Image: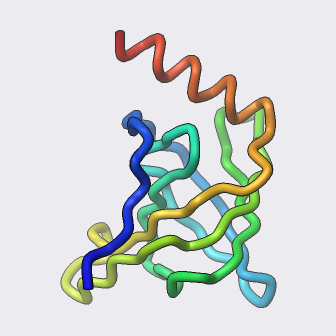
Amino acid sequence: MANKRLVSKRHTKRLPVIFSNGDSEFAGTTSNLSSTGLFIRTRKALNPGTLLKIVLEVDKDKKINLEGEVAWSLKTGLADFKNGMGVKLKDIPQAYEELIKEARSRSL
């Protein structure tokens, strides 16, 4: 079965994240961002359908709180840095929209 991936234009951006499924907290790094979601590289890729609370660390003094659902995950078992998950965001905050606008303007 083919993975359903996010279709919005992606912007490469590596930012540290902490995410939680309600029971446990995990760390990761974004690989890319889009207006509807993001890809998180992590040693702990969770299953599709898992609801997440995400803290995106834009810089030392700026964090963005997000909520989303795992749309697809990649668990290679070969190398930790290749594991990750695509997350579809819900109720996207203005701070995240501004981050995407900034990334978009840099890619022009």
Q: Position of residue 86 (x, y in %)?
A: 46, 64
Residue that appears at 75% across and 60% down: 67
Quarter occupied by the N terminus = bottom left
| Placement of 74 over or under 36, stated as above or below | below
User: Which residue is at 75% across, 44% downward?
Assistant: 92
Query: In front: 48, or 27?
Result: 48
Q: Is residue 31 above or below residue 48?
A: above
Q: Position of residue 55 (x, y in %)?
A: 73, 55
The image position of residue 28, as x and y in percent, is 52, 63
Residue at the left extreme of this rendering: 78
Number of numbered markers: 0
Q: From this view, report whether residue 36 is shown above or below residue 22.
A: above
Colour mode? rainbow
Q: Position of residue 56 (x, y in %)?
A: 67, 48
The part of the image, by quadrant, that contains residue 23 is bottom right
Determine whether, in the image, residue 76 is placed left or right of residue 51: left
Q: Residue at x 50, y 71 (%)?
A: 71
- Which residue is more in the foreground, 6 or 108? 6
Name which quarter of the figure residue 12 lies in: top left
Q: Quadrant of the C terminus?
A: top left
Left or right: 64, with 108 as reference point: right
Q: Is residue 99 left or right of residue 90?
A: left
In this image, 85 relative to 102: left or right? left
* Relative to 97, residue 73 above or below: below
Identify the residue at image location x=44%, y=69%.
85
